[in-house]
Image (spheres, rainbow, N blue to C red):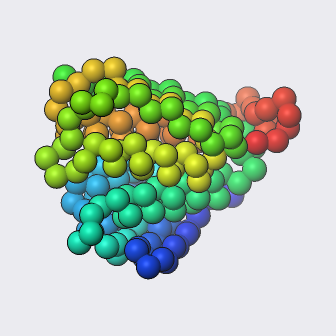
């Protein structure tokens, strides 16, 4: 069975259409109206090997917050839908992702228990036109709606673009491993027999 999902969301702040295939090749078509966010989501698709189609019309004239958060909500919901009952998955994923002078660590458990632990200095640099706080908001929205345990830690870094990129790529690689089917796993990977 193909592990795919399509989700939409319409509010007074955003209108989103998203489809994802977990077992893809990293093809994407992304239009959010926020060029740097499009770049990060394209990297996420490529390095996670997720085929991702996404359009978002948001109130970016206010700021980027609603667009980034709502895309994270819909992406988390879609991945959760595509995973189904999670039979045969590896469940856990971990990535240390270098980006020039930056190193980020991202660890995930597809546990059905939403929690985000996001650790970065308060003085962490932003990309030139994308506040660093939005990276955390995106991760929180994904974790809450995918219902996963997500730990993100900036180990070190100076350049705001590299920092955001390392986190998005790290999330992609950790998710890629956690979502992967392991032929040795029988049923649901939990002693509770439910995730």
Above/below status of 127 relative to 78: above
Above/below status of 23 relative to 167: below
Residue that extends furthest to the right in the rendered view of this protein = 192
In this rendering, the count of numbered labels is 0
Q: Residue at x 27, y 21 (%)?
A: 156
Q: Position of residue 63 (x, y in %)?
A: 27, 64
Q: Closest to the observer: 105 or 53?
A: 105
Q: Residue at x 59, y 53 (%)?
A: 145
Above/below status of 195 relative to 72: above
Q: Quadrant of the N terminus?
A: bottom right
In the picture, measured across the screen, residue 85 lies left or right of residue 73, that is right
Mark yes or no: residue 180 visible: no
Mark yes or no: residue 5 visible: yes
Above/below status of 131 relative to 93: below
Q: Position of residue 20 (x, y in %)?
A: 50, 60
Q: Residue at x 63, y 42 (%)?
A: 114
Q: Quadrant of residue 191?
A: top right
Q: Closest to the observer: 4 or 18?
A: 18
Q: Position of residue 60 (x, y in %)?
A: 27, 69
Q: Closest to the observer: 33 or 31?
A: 33
Q: Quadrant of the C terminus?
A: top right
Q: Quadrant of residue 181?
A: top right
In the picture, measured across the screen, residue 13 lies left or right of residue 132, that is right
């Amino acid at each position: 069975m193909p592990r795919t999902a399509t989700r939409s969301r319409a509010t007074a702040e955003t209108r989103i259409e998203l489809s994802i295939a977990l077992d893809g090749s990293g093809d994407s078509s992304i239009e959010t109206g926020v060029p740097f966010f499009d770049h990060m989501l394209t990297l996420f698709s490529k390095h996670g090997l997720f085929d991702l189609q996404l359009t978002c019309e948001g109130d970016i004239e206010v700021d980027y917050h609603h667009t980034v958060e709502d895309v994270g909500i819909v992406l988390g919901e879609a991945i959760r839908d595509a995973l189904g009952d999670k039979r045969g998955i590896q469940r856990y994923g971990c990535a240390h992702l270098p980006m020039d002078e930056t190193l980020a660590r991202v660890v995930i458990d597809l546990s059905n228990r939403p929690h985000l632990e996001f650790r970065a200095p308060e003085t962490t640099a932003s990309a030139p036109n994308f506040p660093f706080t939005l990276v955390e908001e995106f991760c929180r929205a994904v974790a809450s709606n995918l219902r996963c345990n997500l730990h993100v830690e900036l180990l070190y870094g100076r350049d705001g673009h590299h920092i955001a990129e390392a986190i998005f790529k790290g999330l992609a690689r950790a998710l890629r491993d956690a979502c992967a089917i392991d032929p040795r796993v029988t049923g649901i990977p939990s002693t509770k027999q439910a995730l």
